[in-house]
Amino acid sequence: MTEEELDQKLASARRDLIGDVDAVLDIEAGLRDALLPARRDAVEDAIRTVLDLGSGLAAIVPGAGLIAGRTQAPAAPAGQGELEGGVGATARLLRSLPPADRLALRGDPAITGLASVLRIAGALDFALALDFALAHDFALARVRVLALVRALDLARARGVDLACGHTCEEALDLELSEALDLALAFALALARALDLADAQDVTHERVCGPDLVRTLDLTLARALDLARARVRAHALKQTRGLALAIEDDLHHRRDHADPFADPASSLELALNDFTETDLREVDLVDMSLTGIRWSRGTQWPPGWREQIEQRSGEVEPGVFEIRDGAEHADPSAVLMDL
Amino acid sequence: MDSRPDPPEPSATSRAAPAPLSGLSANTVAEFSAFYRRFVPTLVGFLIWQGVRQADAVEIAQDTMVIAFRSWDRIDRPEAWARRVASRAYARRIADLAEESVAEVPEARSPLLGSPADLDAVIGRHEVLRLLDLLPPRQRQVMAWAVDGYTPGEIAQELRMEPDAVRASLYKARRALAGHVDPRRGGELHD
């Protein structure tokens, strides 16, 4: 046998082998596997277009959306400015009083009630801002999703036309169609989640695989979390109205020339700040001292300084705060206790 | 000959964390898909011809195609590139097994091969593979390239050998195989 004849025999055996190998391989399954990176990127891009990452981040990091400028804080409710101005006046009035009078007013029920109401109002203002931001984002997301659904339907229809007219692009159309199907199913699921959150009726059908189901479940869970957060924010908003009514009631019962209202911190500072203050002539016996802030320049009645220092902690450089347990103290009793 | 640097070989990359794809066009997907459908059986046959275990051949072919897709825009001659990358992946796999001879070899699985038994049956039907088993590894490898249409000079470049060494291997291989051709059975190859 010549070399040529042998090569012909080997070439024939090779062709037969490759033909048989071809028959047992699942070429389409292998191709799908090899194209997975492209499909993954296509799906990721599609998902990215329907996810509101800003809202998701804001749900984890409060205020992130506001910092990024994506959402606008709601305008202050009517009367809020007057309220804040009033509290500022109260704080200024307190600061103008002699230290003994200011200390005495710290335990006044009306003052402590006002401080509490202001703290609640501050928290509720934040919840209200969250409520506005969520409403804004849900409305925007719905518009985006519905537009995407329409665009994907159109693109899929075009893909089918293309497949019919250009068989050479069959692979492309297969991948495009699958990516569009996934994106469409995702968009529809998100639309349903948004509808559930907003109690509005938009219905679609979807068919998807186990992996997509997991993805959609995560999306749905996220949407439900947002919905729950929104319900909580709504409840807080209603509570805020109640708190403001209480504050109004307190406001009318107070006999002050200036109406209440202002940031709670300002009021608390006026009540608690005794740094660099001369208290030597003030009778501290039976007076609530917890929360009072003082400094090295604060002057205490004879016999009090050491006990105050022992019951205080430094909260800022050079500023100390009296901890719970120093109220109603008699210097002799304190000395005995310690 | 494709003189540009090879993309990374399959075993040198992680399929669990593929490199990000950028600038993928519809044409790329279409071209690659056509190449995959046409060439994968050839590549698997090429590896089996060299003596690669059937399941490994399928897995290496698939890994090579995954890398080919990522690097598609940088590959001029995809068939030669795929043969070269697959051959090196096999060499690396052999080296890894030699270093970890006590380790249990996991069963290779690939979406390409639904039933390994089917491929085993194919291998059993082809007498030529049993004849090739008689050849030393280098002769068998050179024969695989030669039967796929590569000249001794091209094979020498692909395998980083001297052309004379390729010719010598081919000569010895052909002489060994020629002794197993039975003229009485119409030139049929037999063990």
Image (cartoon, grey):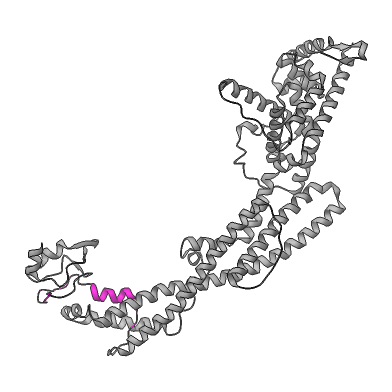
Q: Residue at x 59, y 61 (%)?
A: A220
**Is B23 situated above or below A207?**
above
Q: Position of residue A12 (x, y in %)?
A: 87, 23
User: Whole-percent x and y of residue B169?
Assistant: 75, 13
| Res. A72 in view | no
For the C terminus of chain A, the quadrant is bottom left
Residue A333, picture quadrant: bottom left
Q: Residue at x 72, y 24 (%)?
A: B158
Magenta range is A260-286
Evaluate whether residue A196 shows in this view. yes
Majority SS type along the magenta span? loop
Q: State which quadrant residue A45 falls in.
A: bottom right
Image height of B167 relative to A112, above or below: above
Q: At which x and y percent is residue B123?
A: 78, 24
Residue B56, x across and y down, in percent: 69, 28
Q: Nearer the viewer, residue B177 or A246?
A: A246
Q: Is residue B140 above or below residue A317?
A: above
